[in-house]
Image (cartoon, rainbow, N blue to C red):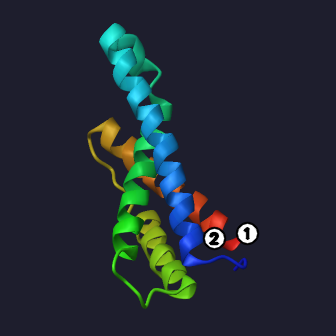
Amino acid sequence: MRDITIEIVKQHLESNKRIATIKVDELRLKMIENAAYALSWSDSAFTAAGEIAIADYILFAMRDNNELTMESLNRYITRDVIRMAQFIEHSTSQCSNMIDRAKLAAYAKLMEFINF
């Protein structure tokens, strides 16, 4: 694990969430102009939504947890990633499957940030 702190991870998540929210907002605006076209090119919005979901989840877990260490946070994230990879969703909804893949990718990016 790199020499990183809980506060640095928190700032990283908050920054990523702000950037991802801008991407989702851009899709909202494009939807008003031409919904069919916007949705046909919405892959980046799914990626952004996955990043927002994971950031919210981890930031909530960090809130009011004074005993959280980098080691316990890493274990917490690793456990979730392993579960998500073992029990991949196979919904009949393609959008649901895309969000689940986006969340797993967001977790992987976070693990990479923390560990490498």
In the figure, 32 relative to 24: above or below? above
Provide residue 104's location: percent of width, then percent of height: 48, 57
Relative placement, left or right, of 5 versus 106 is right
Q: What element does badge 2 sit on?
A: helix
Q: What element does badge 1 sit on?
A: loop
Q: Which quadrant, please, contains the C terminus? A: bottom right
Q: Residue at x 45, y 86 (%)?
A: 68
Residue indicated by mark 2: 114
Q: Which quadrant, please, contains the N terminus? A: bottom right
Residue indicated by mark 1: 116
Dividing the picture into quarters, in which one does residue 5 lie? bottom right
In the figure, 115 relative to 17: above or below? below
Provide residue 30's location: percent of width, then percent of height: 39, 16
Residue type at numbered disc 1: Phe
Residue furthest left as drawn: 92
Provide residue 91's location: percent of width, then percent of height: 28, 46
Provide residue 4's location: percent of width, then percent of height: 66, 76
Work out whether residue 111 or residue 9 is closer to the camera in this orientation and state it: 9
Q: What separation in Å lies between label 2 and label 1 (alpha carbons)?
A: 6 Å
